[in-house]
Image: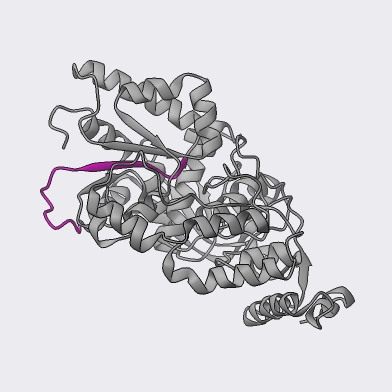
Amino acid sequence: MQLTPEQEALLNGEKGEVMAKIMKTLVMFGDTFGAERLVPVSSQYGHTVISYGLKVLGPVLDVFDEIIDAGLVDGQKFTADPRPLDKNVPTNLLEDVVFKKIMYTDQARFEEQMRKLGITSDDDYTCTCYLPQVGNTPKKGDILSWAESSAVVYANSVLGARCNRNSGMLELMGSVSGFVPEFGFLTDEGRKASWIVEVKCSKKPEAQLLGSAIGMKVMEDVPYIKGMEEWLGTEITPEVSAYLKDMGAATASNGAVGLYHIDNLTPEAKELGESLIKENAQVYVIDDAELERVQKNYPVIWKNPLASPKLCFVGCPHLSLEQLEDWTNKIENSLSFNHLKKVTVPTVFTASPPVIKAFKESGGAARLAACGVILSYICPLMYMNNPLCKAKPVITSSNKLRTYTSARYYTDSQILDIITSKEGK
């Protein structure tokens, strides 16, 4: 790897031993993937996937202390993934003990470290940092040092920024140093598509199902998606943005997609068109039968597959303001149609603190609460990742949550029917 004189000086200890270790780590990371140089991070803010003070993360928190003690806190500010705990989300006594006494015992320590390292705000814990209410929205061509699979794929695909699928810690090292290794999605060649996905459905595909099908087929490759103009048009409106957010999260978790292009819609596809497609690209056709096949093959790992759901999570990744408004209208109408006042399954909608604030100011939060739905800022995945919650029959419309936990997937319309029916199943 060829370093600039400035980078060589940092690697050789000009700013101390800790910065030298950070630079050495970034160089080794880049060498592993064939990077020839480090390039400056150009986005306004970073984003870290680490958002929880798990006891087992003690070594990571110790490294954070090293960085803080070395005075390396004047680098790029950043946002972080959602918090793991919220007293308003339903738990029992045993779950409370597990969360507070065993799992997240270092949460206070962690959040104080985030303040010292440069988190933009105590409210900026969300996986949808790019939404306008949060404000961490990179520009086309910006070089990022982010981790969080759903945020990275959104930034690359919908915003046209450039970021690799980094791991936790590496993204903060990029923010602290101001440099990241140039390879993969940071290069023009690395952003070309090796798959053509032809969507031939009779109706608008469910975003989470479409993303799941694509992710499981192309894995870590880049797909160029055709056939979506009928349903998404050619401009990224708030409604389209929400659709792409959810679709991308499914491609990134059900596979390992870090970038997709949609013909005549996403920025690079509008600019460069089919020149983004590599020669001899493979073709994957998705129709109604293929989406049905994908959903039918999801495993149900509940202890009792016939159990009635005890909890429902909607919002992984976090919901947008427009999605909250749309869900509230649908729940109110469905409850009224079924002569009910409140949802019949304990239901939690998750969104970022700034989006929740805007929803409260509009009066929407009060309407949603009147329907019996809990509005929270937590990460459902962090809530579910323990043996107690895995034993609970939880339903969700998130393919990411389904993939990483025991939650059972249903489409948005199926979830609506379940939580607003008298049977609740």
- Magenta span includes 79: no
Q: Position of residue 74 (x, y in %)?
A: 77, 59
Location of residue 411 with respect to 190 vertically, above or below: above
Q: Position of residue 133 (x, y in %)?
A: 60, 35
Location of residue 41 with respect to 208 vertically, above or below: below
The scheme the figure's colours follow is one colour
Q: Is residue 12 left or right of residue 139?
A: right
Query: Is any part of residue 309 visible from this angle?
Result: yes
Give the residue displayed 68% in from the left and 75% down from the top: 26
Q: Is residue 196 left or right of residue 376?
A: right
Q: Residue 181 occupies which quadrant of the picture?
A: bottom right
Q: For the C terminus, give its image quadrant.
A: top left
Q: Position of residue 88 (x, y in %)?
A: 36, 38
Give the residue displayed 54% in from the left and 45% down from the top: 128
Query: Is any part of residue 260 visible from this angle?
Result: no
- Magenta span includes 316: yes
Give the residue displayed 76% in from the left and 64% down from the top: 178
**Which residue is the extreme one toward the right?**
5
Q: Residue 35 occupies which quadrant of the picture?
A: bottom right
Q: Position of residue 160 (x, y in %)?
A: 66, 50
Q: Which residues are magenta?
A: 301-318
388 vs 161, nearest the viewer? 388
Give the residue displayed 50% in from the left and 66% down from the top: 220
299 vs 226, nearest the viewer? 299
143 vs 147, nearest the viewer? 147
Q: Is residue 68 left or right of residue 2?
A: left
Q: How many marks?
A: 0
Q: For the N terminus, give its image quadrant.
A: bottom right
